[in-house]
Amino acid sequence: IKEDFEIIDKKQIPNMTELKNEEKEKTEEARWSAPILSLAKKASENLALSYGNALKSASLVGFISKPVSNDSTAKTSARYHAMEERANLMNMMKLSIKILIQSALSLGRTLDSDFPPLQQFFVVLEHCLKHGLKVKKTFIGQNKSFFGPLELVEKLCPEASDIATSVKNLPELKTAVGRGRAWLYLALMQKKLADYLKVLLDHKHLLSEFYEPDALMMEEEGAVIVGLLVGLNVIDANLCLKGEDLDSQVGVIDFSLYLKETQDSDGKQDGGITAVLDQKHYVEELNRHLSCTVADLQNKIDCLEKTNSKLQEELAAATDRIGSLQEEQQQLKQQNELIRERSEKSVEVTKEDTKVELDTYKQSRQGLDEMYSDVWKQLKEEKKIRLELEKELELQIGMKTEMEIAMKLLEKDTHEKQDTLVALRQQLEEVKAINLQMFHKSQNAECSLQQKTEVISSFEGKANEMMSSMKQMEERLQHAEKARQAAEERCNKMKQELAGRLDTCRQQMSQLDSKCSTLEKELKSEKEQRQTLQKELHQEKDATTLLKTELQQMEGLKKELRKLQDEKQQLEKVCEEQEQALQEMGLHLSQSKLKMEDIKEVNKALKGHTWLKDDEATHCKQCEKEFSISRRKHHCRNCGDIFCNTCSSNELALPSYPKPVRVCDTCHTLLLQRCSSNSS
């Protein structure tokens, strides 16, 4: 429940000159109320005529068949009457809203359900919603209620679901009319009555199921009424639904309320109330602004936390990928070492083969030439394999350089993250693209490894072939030994020829020595390559240290986040202190309001209530029943008006009377409210 407070100065206490001005203003208000009476009378006459014509047309349509020529005249008359009804209802709505706002501002407090202008406003609004409703036939009978279109608001606007559920949960409401009235009460208390009706008017294709095409809600007058209802957001209402019989209330428009009473408050008091309302709205706007800023800060903190978590995940993924690449490099190095060992073994085997061939060269030159050609081919193939391995190593070095570039980009991204988050996202996308390239390159490396394994298998096949050729050579040696025994006899003859041949063999041996030296040089180059690989491993270790430093920077960012959270807590403390200050202001304002009410009571005591004479009153002021012998007259000791026994059965102790005296119902409620406010 919201409260309105008043700020009172000593200057607002009326003087004698102000009282004289009040009397002049009262005469002017009487002149202003005369045209309103005439408008109200015309509206009531038009409504009576329209309802009478509608009943006549309904009765005639049910029993009498009219000729064709009278249809056009009947339609034009019906349209004319519908336009008059809409115009009258719109005028009455304007008057009721205007008087309700003026009376609420003059009171300067929350309105109750017993407030007469508020009751008349709901009666006029109910007439507007009932205008042009279609009659629905059910098993029980015909049903015509305005709660049907109001139920559509729950589907169109989910904010109205609370109102619909609270209305359905009320056990006292048994009819659709009572539920509709309760719905209107709750919507007014939420200050969203105009918004909900606007939603209905925006979906007229759904309203056509409930209203006739000439109804007020289907025409432009409905939009005008919704625009007028926006002004009711200034009013604070506290309407109690429990204990009220909303099903059996009779909706009758009382035109006497639309005349201005003679005892209205001064213009200065209205100005003070408007100033208080402006202060209240300013404080509410400040609270909303503070809540918005707090929500924005929370959203920013959440975004920063999310981005930090994403960066940590990406760094962990990058470290995992680097570790996997390092493992792959180690595997490649092991494979290279295995290949080198195999090549060295093959070289040793070839050396042994050459020695055997030198021994057997004397016997068969042609076999030695063939073996030499085979060894030469194998050496060429091994050189080709080494060249391919060197190319693969260069590719791996290029991959490492690309990884270093990617890591440098990541470092730049972490530094630039503090400046702009948008640039960080773009750089992260670039890093992702680089990682994809690295993934593709790793796949290519795996393919090359498979090819190497295939080459190794082919080497093993060739080694098997070499073994078979060695066996064949052994067999040839056996044959050669047999031939040697036969050749020893001829050896003496062949010594001269062998001397020249020995010179040629020595030349070939020198050539083989030169080839061995070249092979040793190649082995030295491979050792240098090993050293370069070790240097690259050191560089990778340096890169891991850089990654560790980046993790430390991330911890620094976490500390900054903690600082931001501390600042958020400080802001929340500031907000709580401001709320406490606002509560203290509310207490001061309530005290000032109580002082104002005391001053008003003193003014009333000074002015004195007008004690009506018995001859002047013929009807009860509250229930308006005529006095008779059975219904006697009773004076209210607070306001001085005359009431019947039922309307003045309450008794309360007044300052001017020592004992409890008779008081009317309205004065009883007002005095009880004052007592409760003073006690609080």
Image: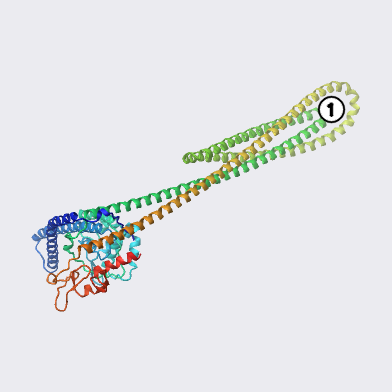
- Residue drawn at x 16%, y 79% is 630
- Residue drawn at x 11%, y 68% is 64
- Residue drawn at x 83%, y 30% is 360
From the image, which quarter does the C terminus lie in? Answer: bottom left
Name the amino acid, label 1.
Lys
- Residue drawn at x 18%, y 62% is 257
Q: Which residue is mark 1?
A: 362
According to the image, what is the colour scheme of the structure? Answer: rainbow
Dot 1, how many residues are within 10 Å of its Cα: few (below 14), some (14-19), or many (20+)?
few
Pick the residue in front: 299 or 512.
299
Q: Is residue 599 above or below residue 397?
A: below
From the image, which quarter does the N terminus lie in? Answer: bottom left
Task: Provide residue 418's location: percent of width, then percent of height.
Answer: 50, 40
Task: Provide residue 357's location: percent of width, then percent of height.
Answer: 81, 30
Q: Is residue 545 visible?
A: yes
- Please indicate whether residue 170 sits to the left or right of residue 135 in the image: right
- Please indicate whether residue 478 sits to the left or right of residue 79 in the image: right
Q: Is residue 133 visible?
A: no
Q: For residue 392, what is the image quadrant? A: top right
Q: How many marks?
A: 1
Disc 1 element: loop
- Please indicate whether residue 214 sits to the left or right of residue 327 in the image: left
Task: Provide residue 205's location: percent of width, then percent of height.
Answer: 26, 56
